[in-house]
Amino acid sequence: MTSAGGPARSDIEIAIIGPQRPALVAALEARFKCHNVHAEPDPLAYLDQHGARFRGAVGSGMAGLQRQHMDRMPNVEICAINGVGLEMTDLALAREKGIAITITPVLYDDVADLALALALAACRRIAHGDRFVRNGDWLKGRLVLGRKLTGMKAGLIGLGRIGSEVASRLEGFKCEIAYVDPVARDVPYRRVADAVTLASESDILFLCAAGAARGTAAPIISRQILEALGPRGIFVNIARGWLVDEPAMVELLASGGLGAAGLDVFDDEPRVPEGLLGLDNVVLTPHIASSTEETMAAMGDTVVANLVSWFEGKGALTAVP
């Protein structure tokens, strides 16, 4: 991780309200006086006592800046989110209070890469094949046939920055691409009116959309959508686990109502539904979409650079409008 320019500002206190990697914490501590609020036995009680001292905060997509934080940090000016997810951040209240919210828009390639990796793994049964070899089952016969990704009808729920990168990669696999999105995009892909129709017309469905905070709205991916995708359909989720009717998905994968899935995110992670663990038609990864050395370093640099620029009076670099 590179170091942002400018002198250290030990007079500026920063609340780290979401867990961060050690390299980022070290880079922040080299520039500011930092408090690992998230690690306190009672973070909100800590903010009750010390919150007025903080002019900046650092969060993550899974631990954004919420009302309970802002009410306890009356002098906070900026919150640097280490990620791009804003479901856990109260943007309306931040705007009302004049608090700048920044993200790290340097992870889209990695997320799209993992989406394709999960798609290939689910189609070609790669995780199942790995277990098949390790368990000695190859000595007893052949692995069941997989599916061909090249030429599939691919549906994307959401065609923002991540969805667009996924689509561009699918072009290389000669896929027929369609999408649903609240905004009509200037792209050579077919826009479909609703997700159920898209699922019914797709061989593989990718969830790339943003959504509401956990527990505040109905899932984007309902049972009806998964049933429309059907017993040969493949579902890939690199968005958020709570945006899917997870019990319905588990049931359909186990019963044959849904063909296969590649999942990087879960409703109550790191807890994963027990029903998924024994299924050979599912590929599971532990929310690693942006977890490469290169991108983690770039994200950390972006967090630090935003804070340094802000407190030098130059404004935020990657602020949410």
Image (tube, rainbow, N blue to C red):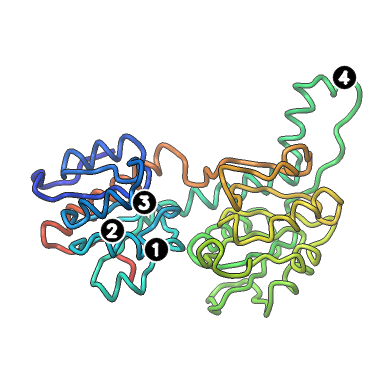
Q: Amino acid at mark 4?
A: Leu
Q: How far apart in space, not on screen, are marks 3 and 2 (Cα)?
A: 10 Å
Nearest to the observer: residue 10 or residue 117: 10
Element at badge 3? Answer: strand
Q: Residues within 10 Å of mark 2 (few under 14, many from 20)?
A: many
Nearest to the observer: residue 80 or residue 171: 80
Name the residue at 85% across, 56% down. 257
Residue carrying label 4: 139
Q: How far apart in space, not on screen, are marks 1 and 4 (Cα)?
A: 53 Å
Q: Amino acid at mark 3?
A: Asn
Q: Is residue 166 visible?
A: yes
Residue carrying label 3: 82
Nearest to the observer: residue 180 or residue 191: 180
Residue carrying label 2: 79
Element at badge 1? Answer: loop
- Where residue 91 appears, x then y in whole percent? 36, 70
Q: Are marks 2 and 1 in contact (CB under 8 Å)?
A: yes
Q: How far apart in space, not on screen, are marks 3 and 1 (Cα)?
A: 12 Å
Element at badge 2? Answer: strand
Residue carrying label 1: 89
Please tell me whether mark 2 or mark 4 is closer to you in this view. 2
Residue that extends furthest to the right in the rendered view of this protein: 141
Q: How far apart in space, not on screen, are marks 3 and 4 (Cα)?
A: 47 Å
Q: Residues within 10 Å of mark 1 (few under 14, many from 20)?
A: many
Residue 21 marker: none
